[in-house]
Amino acid sequence: MNEVFQSLDMVLADAAAHLQRAARDRRSPMHVPVVGTADGDLRMMVLRDCAPDLGLLRFHTDARSAKAGVIADGAPVSVLAFDPEAKLQLRLRGMGRIEQQGPVADAAWAAATPYARRCYLAEAGPGTPADGPCSGLPTEVEGAKPDEAQLLPARDNFAVLLIEPERIDWLYLAHNGHRRAQFARGQDGWQGAWVVP
Ligand SMILES: Cc1cc2nc3c(=O)[nH]c(=O)nc-3n(C[C@H](O)[C@H](O)[C@H](O)COP(=O)(O)O)c2cc1C
C-alpha cells in the first residue's frame, strides 16, 4: 500500500493545514469543532484562528457563559474536529484561558461583523433562566442590524478563548488500515510518534 502520510512532519503539516483552513472557511467541516472543558461539558464553537505552528487556537465567546467561568484564567480544554471527506479526526488538548481585555480581544472585536457582535448584546448571560422562548436580545436589535452606538455595551460581554495545545492526536481512516499519530509539545516544538490506531 502506498503511504499517503509518509512522515510525522507531513502529518503535522496536514493537521495545521486543516485547522487553518477551518478558521478561514465556514464551509470547512472543521470550522465548528467541539470544545470540551474539565467539568465534563462539551459544546460546538466556531474556530476563529489557528497559528501556523498549532501553538494557539482562538475562539469567541460570551464572558458570562458557563464555559468562560470554568476556564477563566487557565484550565484544561480539549478540541475535537472531524473532516469526513478527508477521513480525518483531530483531537487537541491544552490549557485554555479567557481574555476579555487586551490586544487579542480588541482586534477580534474590531474584526467581527455587526451581526456577530449583536450576540453579545443579550441582556442576561447565556444559560440565564427565561420566562419563555427568547433570544435575550433587546427588542430594537432583534431581526435588525445594530448600529455602532447600539453595539457599544456588547463589548463588555465579549471575550476570546485562547487555547495553547499541548497534545495532538491525529487519526486518518483508510480502507486498508487506519493511521494514527500523536504529538506532544516540548521546548523544541512538537514531538511526534506513530501509534496503533
Ligand atoms: C454551529 C454552532 C456554532 C456555535 N459557535 C459558538 C461560538 O463560536 N462561541 C460560543 O460561545 N458558542 C457557540 N455556540 C453555542 C455553544 O455550542 C453553546 O451552546 C453556548 O456557547 C453555551 O455553552 P456553555 O454553557 O458551555 O458556556 C455554537 C453552537 C452551534 C450549534
Image (cartoon, helix red, strand yellow):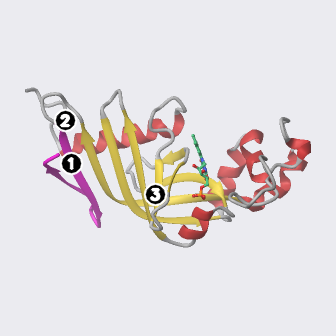
Residue at mark 3: C-beta within 8 A of ligand 1: no
Residue at 55% x, 69% y: name it. 70
Q: Gap in Å between the C-alphas at discs 3 and 1? A: 21 Å
| Nearer-N-terminus badge (3/1) | 3
User: Which residue is at a point 15% across and 37% down the rendered structure image?
Assistant: 6
Whole-angstrom CA distance, mark 1 to mark 2, is 10 Å
Specify the label residue 136 is tagged with.
none
Q: Residue furthest bottom?
A: 73
Q: Position of residue 11 (x, y in %)?
A: 25, 42
Is there a contact, CB below 8 Å, between mark 3 and mark 1?
A: no
Mark 3 to mark 2 CA distance (whole Å):
28 Å
Q: Which residue is mark 3?
A: 36
Of residue 11 and residue 84, the one placed in the foreground of this image is 84
User: Looking at numbered disc 3 in the image, what kind of residue is underneath it?
Assistant: Gly
How far across and down, in percent of the image, does residue 87 sit?
30, 32
Mark closer to the chain start, 1 or 2: 2
Q: Circle 2 sits in a helix, a strand or a loop, which is it?
A: loop
> Which span of residues is magenta-colored?
178-197
Q: Amino acid at mark 1?
A: Ala
Q: Which residue is mark 2?
A: 5
Instruction: Please report whichever mark, 3 or 2, sits nearer to the chain's N-terminal start.
Output: 2
Between residues 126 and 54, which one lies in front from this camera angle? 126
Q: What is the quadrant of residue 123 in the picture?
A: bottom right
Looking at the image, which residue is at 45% across and 56% down?
56
Q: Determine whether label 1 and label 2 are within 8 Å by CB.
A: yes
Q: Which residue is mark 1?
A: 181
